[in-house]
Image (cartoon, rainbow, N blue to C red):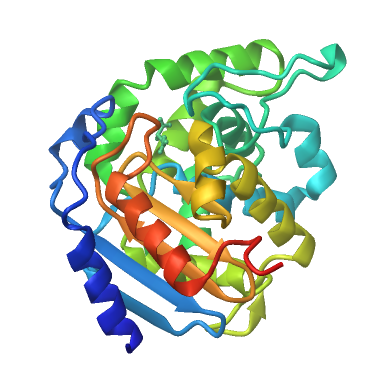
Amino acid sequence: TPVPDYLADLLRNCKAAHGGELADYIPELASADPTKLAVALTTLDGVIYSAGDDEHEFSIQSISKAFTYAYVIEELGLQRVMRKVGVEPSGEAFNEISLDKTDEQQIKPKNPMINSGAITVHSLIPKAEKSCRAETVRLFFSKLAGRELAFDQEIFHSEKETAFRNLSIGYSLRNFNILESDPVEIVESYVKQCAINVTVKDLVNMMSVLVNDGILPRTGERILSHKTVRQVLTVMTTCGMYNAAGDWLANVGIPAKSGVSGGIIGVLPGQVGLAVFSPKLDRYGNSVRGIDIMQQMSRDMGLHLLEGV
Ligand code: GLN
């Protein structure tokens, strides 16, 4: 079957996947339309296919963590980033106020895919004189997506007003000097990073740089070094699906990242990038139908990393 028909079939078949709840700790997310469903795919050379509600915009949320991590490694070098944030899976919920205290000299968040790590990574973005770090992120994401992305102001304000948990993570990070400046400013800017609006097509465009070992296929420009891409894909593999990372690796078997608005991305380096969207989440905060579709695609296309090794 041609790819577009295949994708449309996938969506039809997964309509039956029930269950899950809308995220409601960000009040504005609770008003999402739960029937929205979309899938997109990029090939190695950046050809894009999509189906369903592929023009529907949603806030990128935690999927942003993977790309901001890439940006910061590229700007500061891996060593400096590693001093601030580790790469150990936490096995905990994404919003756990969690710090690795094994080395007392170097207390740090366990990995960049949970909030404590992502807030720290956000703080490492070199601060531009006249704009917040979130704006730097928006410009970087727009470059990858190949169009100008915008902040969802409703989502941003809604989350900012209720960001008590992330603020407590921020204060805790500041207490250990992991954050080196005002935690409130950093957390608010991190929340804004999460409120950048994307479609599934934007996501696969952004991912094409990860599929293609750091080169943006649309322009041929090298954006990330091989080392950066490998690092990002590594933490996506071990930590991208929070405390469901093991299940995901067993059943789908590719580096991935999910977000609470209902998106999931998955990458098979050198082959394909996949993105799905459906707002209802399981208890780990991962999209129920999204997982269903990703599992199906992994099976159909034999994507599991350890398949046929
Ligand atoms: N902005 C959300 C938060 O920090 C992102 C979490 C997520 O997508 N899992 O809580």
What residue sits 26% from the left and 63% below the top? 38
Task: Classify the position of ligand 1 by quadrant: top left, top right, bottom left or bottom right.
Answer: top left
Residue 266, x across and y down, in percent = 49, 59
How many marks on residues?
Answer: 0
Residue 57, x across and y down, in percent = 25, 58
What residue sits 23% from the left and 73% below the top? 9
Residue 291, x across and y down, in percent = 37, 50
Residue 169 higher or lower than 158, as above or below? above
Residue 146 higher or lower than 108, as above or below? below
- Report the quarter where the N terminus lies: bottom left
The answer to whether any part of residue 197 appears in the image is no
Residue 36 higher or lower than 271, as above or below? above
What residue sits 49% from the left and 36% below the top? 244
- Report the quarter where the C terminus lies: bottom right
Residue 260, x across and y down, in percent = 35, 39
Which residue extends farthest front? Answer: 308
Q: Is residue 26 left or right of residue 128?
A: left
What residue sits 22% from the left and 34% below the top? 21
Q: Is residue 8 left or right of residue 75?
A: left
Q: Is residue 258 left or right of residue 28?
A: right
